[in-house]
């Protein structure tokens, strides 16, 4: 990670990584302000989670005096699979159907760059 990069990590978020990856492409490579405004008006649950993580990364950047917050862009968003909770639902004839409750680890990387 270069000196002008900042990141924030959200771990054990109770949403499937597949659902988060669906939203990522809309904001990757955008300036932070534009990306946050896009996420704010998206109806998906993942958009709210990503918005919170991006705001955390901006707050982390605010702690470094050499970084100009207005010139930050969303360089990369990585979603990894977290642990899966296994549950069972009762079915007919005494059987059980497995339910997988997936979780995600979300990493947002911001970088200083020219605004498009």
Image (cartoon, rainbow, N blue to C red):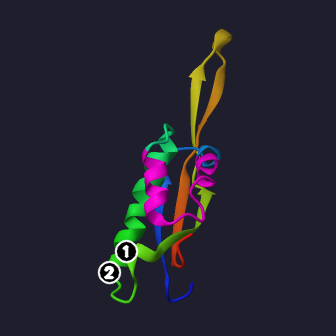
Q: Quadrant of residue 71?
A: bottom left
Image side of residue 43 versus residue 67, left or right:
right
| Depicted 105 relative to depicted 18: above or below | below
**Res 11 seen here:** no
Image position of 50 (left or right of 16): left
Image quadrant in which you'd find residue 80: bottom right
Query: Which residue occupies the foreground of this view, 62 or 105?
Result: 62
> Residue sitting at 64 percent across and 30 percent down?
98
Name the chief secondary structure element in magenta: helix
The residue indicated by pointer 1 is: 60
Question: Residue 109: x and y, percent?
Answer: 53, 71
Q: Position of residue 48 (x, y in %)?
A: 43, 47
**Looking at the picture, how far across and down is residue 17, in whole percent?**
61, 49
Work out which quarter of the rendered image holds the N terminus and state it.
Answer: bottom right
Write the residue at 63% across / 54% down. 25
Q: Is residue 47 above or below residue 3?
A: above
The kind of secondary structure element at disc 2 is loop
**Residue extending farthest top:** 93
Q: Which residues are magenta?
A: 20-40
Q: Which residue is mark 2?
A: 63
Which of the 4 image quarters holds residue 27?
Answer: bottom right
x and y, in percent, of residue 81 in the image: 62, 54
Look at the image and say whether residue 86 sits in the magenta stretch: no
Which residue does the image show at 47% across and 49% down from the upper left? 39
Tag 1–tag 2 contact (CB < 8 Å): yes
């Amino acid at each position: 990670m270069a000196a002008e990069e900042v990141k924030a990590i959200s771990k054990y978020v109770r949403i499937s990584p597949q659902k988060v990856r669906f939203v990522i492409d809309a904001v990757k490579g955008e300036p932070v302000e534009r990306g946050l405004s896009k996420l704010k008006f998206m109806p998906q649950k993942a958009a709210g989670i990503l918005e919170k993580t991006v705001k955390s990364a901006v707050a982390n950047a605010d702690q470094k005096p050499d970084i100009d917050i207005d010139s930050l862009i969303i360089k990369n968003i990585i979603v990894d699979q977290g642990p899966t909770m296994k549950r069972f639902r009762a079915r007919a004839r005494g059987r059980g159907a497995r339910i997988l409750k997936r979780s995600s680890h979300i990493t947002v990387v911001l970088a200083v760059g020219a605004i498009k």
